[in-house]
Amino acid sequence: MKSKKILLLLAVAALMVLVGVPALAVGPTPTTSTISISPPSPVCDGDQVTITGKVTPVTVCGTIQIQDSTDQQNWTTIDSGSPDGSGNFSIVFDTTGLAGQTVYFLSHFVPGGGRPCGYGESKSPALPLSIGACCEGGLQISADLASGDGIPPPGTTNATWQFEIKVKACQDVTGVYAQGGTSGWTTFNGASQTAGTWEIYKTTTGKSSTKVLRWKIGDMTAGQEETLLVTVKGSIKPSAVCGSIQYLSGPWSATYSTDGGATFQKSDYTDRVFVTVTCAP
C-alpha cells in the first residue's frame, strides 16, 4: 500500500511537469535606500553640495536615481548611475541663485531586471536642504575679469576686455546703485546690465581720461544678484615690463538702504580688475 502511494505521488509530479505547472516563484531580495547631504542643511547660496544615494544590500545590479522637488509631490530625476562598491552614487548640486528656497532630495533604487539580479526597488525618505543668502551686511559687490586675454604680451594692440560688476543683496535693500570707473589707458566701449540703468556719471581729464559709471539698480530682495558688464579697449605698450600689472578698472562700491530710504550706507570697495603682461618663455 505504501509503495502505491509513492507511485501515485510520482505520477502527479510528472503530470505537473508535463502540463507546465510553474514552480513557486521566489520574490526579489528587499533593498533599502537612504540619502545624505554634505555639508548638511542649512547651506548658503552658491555652495556646492554633495548628494549621496545609498542602497543596501550592496549591489551593482541596477541604478540609483537622485531626485529633487520643491513641494515633495512633483519629483524630477536630476542624475542617475550605478552604485559603487559601497552601494553609493553621488552628485554635486550647485545652490547658486536658490537663496530662500528649500529643496527636497530622495534616492530611488531601480533594479536592473529579473534573475539573476533578484533585487527589489526602494526609495529613501525625502531629505530637505534649506538654502540661505548667507552674506554679511546689506549686500556684497565684486569685480572680476569676464572676457579677454588676462595675460597679454607686450605690444598687444586694440585688444578688447570685459569686466563684470556683481551686486548681491544679503537682505531686502532699497535705492541700490553701484559706482566705479575705468582705467585711464583704456577706452570705454559700452556696458550692459541685467537690471536697472547705467550712466556716465563723470569723466576725468588730464594726463589720462577715465569714465566714472553709476549703475542704478533700485530695490533688491534677499538673495537677488545682478550684473553689469563693462567693455573697454586698449593697447599694451611694447615696452611694458613682463609681469607688470595693467589695471582695467578702478575700485567699485555700492550704496544702499536697509530702512526704506531713511538712511544710506556704502559697501566696501572691490579690488581693481587687472591683466598681467606676460612674455613668451
Image (cartoon, rainbow, N blue to C red):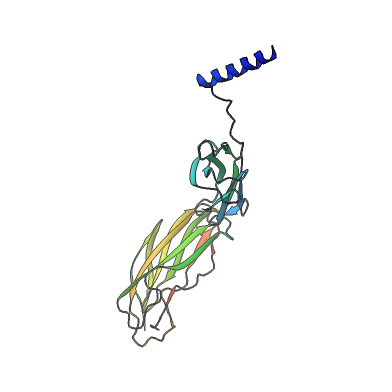
Residue 119 sits in quarter:
top right
Q: Where 193 sits versus 9, above or below?
A: below
Residue 107, given in percent of the width and then of the height, sits at 56, 43
Farthest residue, direction bottom: 239
Farthest residue, direction right: 2
Depth check: 19 or 254 in front?
19
Residue 128, given in percent of the width and then of the height, sits at 60, 45
Depth check: 237 or 85 in front?
85
Residue 206 visible in the current orientation: no
Depth check: 41 or 233 in front?
41
Residue 239 visible in the current orientation: yes
Q: Is residue 1 left or right of residue 227?
A: right
Residue 78, given in percent of the width and then of the height, sits at 48, 46
Q: Residue at x 30, y 79 (%)?
A: 157
In which quadrant of the rendered image does the C terminus lie? Answer: bottom left
Residue 171, given in percent of the width and then of the height, sits at 56, 54
Q: Where 17 sits versus 189, above or below?
A: above
Residue 244 sits in quarter:
bottom left
